[in-house]
Structures are given as C-alpha cells and as structure tokens.
Image (tube, rainbow, N blue to C red):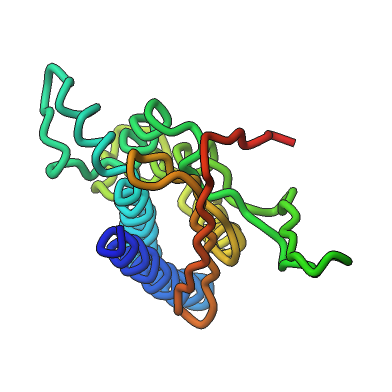
C-alpha cells in the first residue's frame, strides 16, 4: 500500500503544481488580455483535473483494473486519461472515493481528535466533471461559423475554480476499501507538501452524508 500512497501523493503534488501555473497564467491574462495566456491556463487546469482523477485510481487500483477489464471497448485501464470517465467508473466501485473536505482537527475532552466536515466553498464531484468537460471545448481552434465561446466569462470560471479546488485539497479524507486495508487516508496539503494520516478500520463502515 505504501507504493500506492506515494503515487497518490506525487500526483496530488503534481496537480497542485499545475494549479499554481494555471493561476499565474490566468492572472497574466486579466492584466494584459493575451488569449494565449488564457489558453495555456486552461490546458494546465484540464491536466490538473486529469492528474487528480488518475491519483484517485491508486488506492482503488485492483478493483478499478478489474472493473475496466469488463468493458467491451478499450478495457485497458493503463490507457485511461479522461477525468470525467475515470470518476464515473470509480463511483461504481467505491462511492466514497472522492475527497471529502475537512476542517482542522479539534481536541475533545477525552483527549481524542475530531475533524468536522467542511460544508461549503469547495469543489464537489459534479463541479469537477462539469468543468472538465467544458475545458475540452477551449483546447481547440475556433470555428468561425460556430457559436461564440465567451472566453471572458470562462476565464472568470477558471480563476474561481482554482481557489475552490485548493479548498477541497487543503484538508480532506478519502475512503479506502480493499481486501488488504479498510479505512481512510486523511491528507493535508500545505506549501505543496502532501502529508498523510492513516486511519484503519477493523471492519466495514458507513460514511454518512450529512
């Protein structure tokens, strides 16, 4: 499992690096209105989302590989790249794989520590899929006979999404259910460093949606 933790951490770190680059470019776009900066920021945003989706395969690798092998077309999971498709497939094998954001831990009277859930201002899975699919449209040359892509409005969407994704990744947990390990990985990203806290369960458990 440690090798999968490293893959996961490395990929999250890479996604954060892409987000930083995306932010530099989108800020430059709003300063000088060079559409090439905007296009470049969109590319880095899309890759960041793909990287996060690929990271999520790591703790679910065995089940994901088995699930993908049953597909009639393109059953080789090592060729997967489309983030929205990866997330939908992962949802079929582990409904709690997507990062669940947390607030900083509080020490309770009995000496234990408790994380409350973050309730707002973070990037949920529906927003992830919707943004990823929208980004693809802006990676192609403009057809002069097609509808206006409204670059300016979408630039604002990209800028807002950067902070929303960071809020998701700041502190969160993801659920792991494998024959070898059942529990959670709690991750904190600070200054582009990914830190792990591992909580193992002695049996099956339920993640409440509240």
Q: Which residue is more in the foreground, 1 or 30?
A: 1
| Number of residue marks | 0
- Residue 85 in the image: state x and y as whole percent: 32, 33
Question: What is the residue that sits farthest to the bottom in this orientation?
Answer: 191
Q: Which residue is more in the foreground, 180 or 106?
A: 180
In which quadrant is the N terminus drawn?
bottom left
Rendering quarter of residue 40? bottom left
In which quadrant is the C terminus drawn?
top right
Q: Is residue 4 above or below residue 208?
A: below
Residue at image position (59%, 49%) is: 100
| Residue 110 appears in the picture as rendered | yes
Rendering quarter of residue 60? top left
- Residue 96 in the image: state x and y as whole percent: 51, 38
Q: Which residue is more in the foreground, 173 or 142?
A: 173
Residue at image position (48%, 32%) is: 95
Residue at image position (72%, 53%) is: 118
Q: Is residue 21 above or below residue 207?
A: below
| Residue 33 appears in the picture as rendered | no
Question: What is the residue that sits farthest to the front in this orientation?
Answer: 202
- Residue 153 in the image: state x and y as whole percent: 55, 51
Residue at image position (55%, 69%) is: 188
Q: Is residue 186 above or below residue 140?
A: below
Q: Is residue 135 above or below residue 156?
A: above
- Residue 27 in the image: state x and y as whole percent: 51, 74
């Amino acid at each position: 499992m440690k090798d999968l933790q490293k893959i996961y951490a490395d990929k999250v770190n890479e996604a954060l690096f892409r987000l930083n680059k995306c932010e530099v470019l989108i800020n430059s776009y709003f300063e000088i209105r060079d559409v090439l900066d905007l296009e470049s920021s969109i590319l880095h945003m899309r890759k960041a989302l793909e990287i996060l989706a690929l990271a999520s395969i790591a703790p679910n690798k065995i089940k994901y590989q088995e699930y993908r092998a049953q597909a009639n077309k393109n059953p080789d999971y090592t060729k997967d790249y489309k983030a929205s498709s990866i997330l939908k497939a992962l949802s079929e094998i582990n409904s709690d794989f997507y990062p669940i954001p947390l607030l900083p831990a509080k020490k309770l009277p009995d000496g234990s520590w408790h994380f409350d859930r973050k309730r707002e201002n973070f990037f949920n899975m529906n927003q992830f899929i919707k943004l990823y699919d929208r980004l693809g449209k802006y990676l192609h040359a403009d057809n002069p006979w097609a509808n206006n892509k409204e670059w300016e409005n979408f630039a604002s969407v990209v800028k807002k999404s950067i902070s929303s994704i960071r809020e998701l990744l700041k502190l969160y947990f993801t659920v792991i259910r494998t024959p070898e390990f059942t529990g959670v990985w709690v991750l904190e990203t600070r200054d582009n460093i990914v830190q792990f806290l591992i909580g193992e369960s002695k049996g099956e458990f339920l993640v409440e949606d509240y």
